Image (cartoon, rainbow, N blue to C red):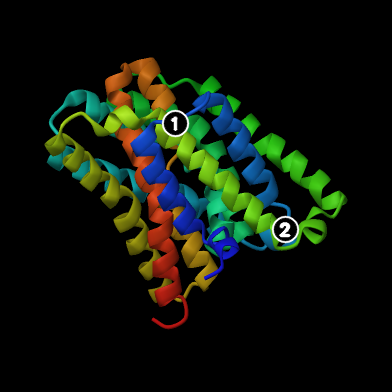
Amino acid sequence: MKARHLFLNSGFLILIALLVGIATGVSYKPRESTYLLLGTIMALSITRIDFHRMKSKGKKGIFLPILLVYGFSPLMTLLPAYLLIKNQDFINGFILMAVVPSAVSLVAFSRILDGDLELALSGTGSVYLASLILMPLMGWFMLGEGISVFSLVYSVTLLVLLPFIVSRILVFIKTDERLGEGKKYLTNILFFILVLNIVGAKRSAFFIGGEMILAISIACIVKTSVAGTIIYFTAKKLGMEEEDARSYALFGSFKNGGLAVALAVALFGAGAAIPAAISIVFDMGSMSYYGFLFKRYGKNF
């Protein structure tokens, strides 16, 4: 395999970024750089959105993502946490992961994993609108604490609204035609830097004790990989298109870990942020898993 082909393998790059980040702790202004990198990736990822097709997604493209993010995903997040973890700070961290919306990077993940981009975009929009009501309600019900709507609006503005505007400019100047295959190289390199920066900033989360790390890790695997796998095969059994099944799997497994970390620190302190910090690592690492899963079962099932 030629060296340049490795830059087209997003799973390989993410794995290397995980290992380097844990080993070195390298990071630079993780909050600011995360917004910049994710915003850029989002803008590049949604340039090929077909808005006529997005409208055709109908109710399934609007309500099913909300049901997955705020129904199925919280169940798969909290069940293993309550079974395996006794520390209340960590439990609070998992509750916050349950009530935050899906990751805004899900659109970019859908592009990399050949999911349905229009479904990912329309679903993300509906989820974030619903979260304005569901986040405070679920947070109050499970934690008795208010959740900052300002943090959500701020994240949506920087990571959804602005990238959308930029993407229209990129379409106007025909960026896709100009970059060609180079666009995927650029996107994968940006993902590499993003993962390296996030993992490096939260490296200390991996040194809190072997048993607790194992328990949190198992819960994170269930939340991400197991949940998504269940949704993927269920969608295929129900006769949904392959691209739709892939995107729905992501909706049921990828949460906004950055927002969960920020809310955990603000409401409960750094201890409650550890589960979300570790979950980010498994979220990024699961990209390799989903790449294998979709390739293995994408044609015949």
Image-quadrant location for residue 104: top right
Q: Residue, x 28% and y 50% (percent of image)? A: 221
Query: Which secondary structure, mark 2?
Result: loop
Query: Which secondary structure, mark 1?
Result: loop
Mark 2: which amino acid?
Answer: Arg
Frontmost residue, 156 versus 128:
156
Residue 170 falls left or right of residue 295: right
Q: Residue 175, percent across and down?
A: 80, 53
Q: Residues within 10 Å of mark 2 (few under 14, many from 20)?
A: some
Image height of 176 relative to 211, above or below: below
Frontmost residue, 235 versus 18:
18
Q: Residue 254, percent across and down?
A: 42, 47
Residue named by callout 2: 48
Mark 1: which amino acid?
Answer: Val
Q: Residue, x 75% and y 46% (percent of image)? A: 167
Precedes in sequence: disc 1 or disc 2: 1
Q: Residues within 10 Å of mark 1 (few under 14, many from 20)?
A: some
Q: Residue 163, percent across and down?
A: 69, 39
Residue 57 falls left or right of residue 217: right
Q: Residue, x 45% and y 55% (percent of image)? A: 250
Residue named by callout 1: 26
